[in-house]
Image: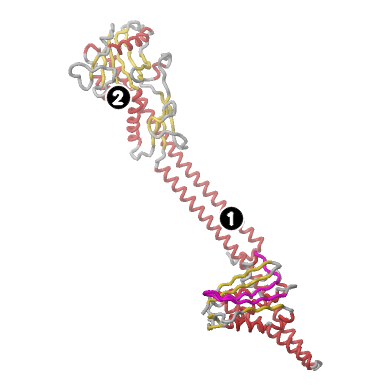
């Protein structure tokens, strides 16, 4: 793609990038929508399962909580089993074995007295208010009498008998809150003469702590062995009775049910004032449903893969665009380089041709010919330096070039370069200060490469100096390095351009003065190849100092 980006131009490349980014965004959006619908479908399946599970729980609760009233009490009345006959123990024993919530059964015949009321309980779960019977209990049902409790029950059930109620249902408090359900039998159709009463009492505290959790476990086993649906029961104050409780899952299902251990229809028309039926909530949450979990994990993975692919596409396109821009910039720099080099080559050649034509015409004196010869030497030196830079550029581009290293004295390199630039420095009226201490340690280097390096530094200093023409060359030694500083008071380099001055073909704001854009790039490569360090410090309007540090021998 990098190859074709320049064909579109900058504006076309921007449109191409915008189109690809928009396509990636549309792709991600379509994938997100598809995954969202997938998740919604999975959530609907899980919600349907939760709804079926909560319906199953509600049906189980209704059937079980009404079982004693609808089956046991009704069968006792239908079969005409009397308390006095002793046959009541068998159906009560069956009820206590089948249904866990009745704590105590009670029964009497007309006319009742507190001493004639008999209570039937489990031997392992007798209420504290029921006294221990004398003699051996009739296992698994214990029959006993409790006149104080019987007196309270008689007083309350007599009110319902006076009203002709078939069922006497009310709340009652002993050592714990109870729900009392009793079936009243009458001798006449008008329900004026009660003949017997059979009922049971449910300890609501015990039911809260034990009954509902056991029933929920049974329903969970029936619903599925994978336990994918999690059941909870909340009371009327939204406190958890079974399970973790809490709400907010989108796929969960809930239903309310009455806390009534009887059929609520029997008191729907004329509810007693001392009966309060609260509504609890059953919740089925498919949090562990494998379908939902697989959909969620698959959706996350698919969305992540799609996002990574879109991101990779965008990053790849951005990198391609940057590469195209870099290629375009490099092409522009190379064009500037060719133009500058052409100008730099033409100028000394044209000058040298003019000098030689003048000399060949024979119209110059001996003194004038000497001046023309010196001008020719300067132009030839200028041309040689440009050719050296071009050759050096070819060499530093080819990393296979090998230097001829030897022990080199920097004083000799500085002396040679200053002499080469003496005519240019004199023409520019430069104030030159050279401070190379005696006994400066030698460096292991290629002398030709160091001379080319210093020549480029001096050429830049001369080229970019205007009003203040000052040049200082200083050498000093440290423990491991020998440092050479070349400082001028020229136009300087702005801070934002300091990182670019060592790039090939880069030319600063003063490029109208000529130059190939290779000088500092060659200096940087030569210093790096010699294991040294290059440091350029500059400030616009103040000048530039180039510090070259090379290892000692």
Quick one: which residue is furthest to the front in this view? 438
| Vertical order, 546 against 427 (above or below) | above
Looking at the image, tell me whether mark 2 or mark 1 is earlier in sequence order.
Answer: 1
Q: Position of residue 19 (x, y in %)?
A: 61, 56
| Vertical order, 257 against 117 (above or below) | below
Q: Is residue 81 magenta?
A: no
Give the quarter of the image for residue 260.
top left
Give the quarter of the image for residue 6.
bottom right
Q: Which residue is mark 1?
A: 21
Q: Position of residue 345 (x, y in %)?
A: 69, 81
Q: Nearer the viewer, residue 189 or 414?
A: 414
Which numbered disc covers residue 99? 2
Q: Position of residue 530 (x, y in %)?
A: 54, 77
| Vertical order, 297 against 540 (above or below) | above
User: Few, some or many C-alpha atoms within 10 Å of disc 2 (few <14, some 14-19, many ≥20)?
Assistant: some
Is residue 160 found left or right of 139 in the rendered image? right
Range covered by the magenta-colored residues? 469-495
Quadrant in the picture for the N terminus: bottom right
User: Few, some or many C-alpha atoms within 10 Å of disc 1 (few <14, some 14-19, many ≥20)?
Assistant: some
């Amino acid at each position: 793609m990098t190859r074709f980006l320049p064909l579109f131009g900058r504006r076309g490349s921007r449109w191409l990038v915008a189109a690809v980014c928009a396509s990636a965004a549309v792709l991600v959006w379509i994938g997100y929508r598809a995954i969202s619908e997938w998740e919604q479908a999975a959530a609907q399946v899980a919600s349907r399962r939760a709804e079926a599970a909560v319906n199953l729980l509600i049906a189980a609760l209704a059937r079980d909580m009404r079982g004693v009233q609808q089956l046991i009490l009704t069968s006792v009345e239908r079969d005409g089993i009397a308390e006095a006959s002793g046959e009541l123990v068998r159906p009560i024993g069956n009820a206590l074995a089948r249904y866990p919530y009745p704590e105590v059964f009670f029964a009497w015949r007309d006319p009742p007295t507190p001493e004639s009321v008999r209570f039937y309980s489990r031997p392992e779960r007798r209420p504290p208010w029921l006294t221990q019977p004398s003699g051996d209990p009739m296992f698994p049902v214990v029959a006993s009498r409790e006149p104080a409790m019987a007196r309270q029950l008689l007083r309350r059930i007599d009110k319902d008998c006076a009203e002709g109620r078939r069922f006497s249902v009310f709340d009652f408090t002993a050592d714990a809150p109870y729900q009392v359900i009793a079936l009243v039998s009458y001798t006449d159709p008008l329900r004026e003469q009660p003949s017997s009463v059979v009922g049971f009492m449910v300890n609501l505290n015990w039911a809260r702590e034990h009954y509902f959790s056991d029933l929920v476990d049974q329903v969970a086993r029936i619903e599925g062995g994978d336990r994918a649906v999690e059941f909870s029961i909340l009371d009327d104050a939204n406190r958890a009775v079974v399970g973790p409780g809490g709400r907010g899952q989108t796929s969960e299902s809930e239903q309310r049910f009455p806390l009534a251990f009887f059929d609520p229809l029997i008191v729907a028309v004329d509810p007693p004032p001392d009966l309060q039926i609260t509504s609890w909530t059953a919740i089925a949450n498919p949090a562990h449903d494998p379908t939902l979990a697989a959909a969620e994990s698959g959706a996350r993975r698919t969305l992540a893969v799609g996002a990574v692919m879109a991101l990779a596409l965008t990053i790849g396109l951005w990198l391609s665009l940057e590469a195209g821009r870099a290629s375009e910039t490099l092409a522009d720099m190379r064009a500037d380089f060719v133009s500058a080099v052409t100008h730099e080559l033409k100028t000394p050649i044209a000058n040298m041709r003019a000098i030689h034509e003048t000399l060949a015409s024979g119209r110059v004196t001996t003194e004038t010919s000497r001046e023309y010869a010196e001008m020719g030497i300067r132009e030839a030196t200028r041309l040689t330096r440009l050719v050296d830079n071009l050759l050096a550029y070819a060499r530093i581009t080819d990393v296979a070039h090998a230097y001829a290293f030897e022990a080199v004295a920097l004083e000799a390199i500085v002396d040679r370069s200053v002499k080469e630039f003496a005519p240019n420095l004199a023409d520019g009226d430069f104030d030159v200060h050279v401070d190379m201490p005696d006994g400066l340690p030698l460096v292991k280097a290629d002398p030709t490469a160091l001379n080319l390096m210093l020549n480029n530094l001096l050429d830049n200093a001369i080229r970019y100096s205007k009003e203040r023409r000052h040049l200082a060359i200083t050498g000093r030694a440290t423990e491991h390095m020998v440092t050479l500083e070349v400082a001028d008071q020229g136009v300087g380099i702005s801070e934002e351009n300091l990182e670019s001055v060592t790039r090939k073909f880069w030319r600063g704001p003063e490029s109208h003065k000529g130059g190939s854009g290779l000088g500092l790039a060659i200096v940087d490569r030569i210093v790096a190849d010699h294991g040294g360090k290059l440091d350029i410090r500059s400030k616009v309007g103040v000048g530039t100092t180039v510090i070259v540090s090379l290892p000692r021998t």
